[in-house]
Amino acid sequence: MSSIPEKDWKLFRKLQNDLTAKACELIFVKVDELAKNRAGSEHTSYLELYGLIQDEDVKIAEMFNNPTRNNVLLKLVALKSYGVFTDDQFQMFSQETQDRVDSMLELRC
């Protein structure tokens, strides 16, 4: 995987804490929804929660584990794919990087 421009790498590093917080918040929304609907099916809901946490942990790893300039493009693809990026955040990256991410997303579907 080829790297992205230095300024995009620095931008990713700058946004990383906010993006992590947003990803976690999206997970908490799913957990809250599951918890609201558990009445009468607590054990089933627990199993669903356990599965949700496992699935979301895989996504968190895909988005944030061990970012390097050589793999950050894949991190950006995951962030956009999972709806963590706001449009404004994504548009802060160079047009070259945006185009590469969008091209990779087309192949991912």
Image (spheres, rainbow, N blue to C red):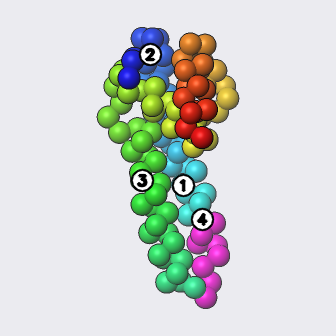
Residue 15: x and y, percent? 50, 28
- The residue carrying mark 1 is 27
For the point 42% across and 53% down, the residue is: 57
- The residue carrying mark 2 is 4
Left or right of 69? Residue 94 is right
Q: Distance between the residues labelled 4 and 3?
A: 17 Å
Residue 87: x and y, percent? 67, 29
Residue 86: x and y, percent? 64, 33
Q: How far apart are marks 1 and 4 (CA)?
A: 9 Å
- The residue carrying mark 4 is 32
For the point 46% across and 26% down, the residue is: 73
Residue 37 part of the magenta-drawn span: yes
Q: Residues within 10 Å of mark 1 (few under 14, many from 20)?
A: some
Kindly identify the amino acid type of the residue bearing the numbered disc 2: Ile
Kindly identify the amino acid type of the residue bearing the numbered disc 1: Ile
Q: Distance between the residues labelled 1 and 3?
A: 10 Å
Magenta region: which residues? Answer: 33-40
Q: Nearer the viewer, mark 4 or mark 3?
A: 3
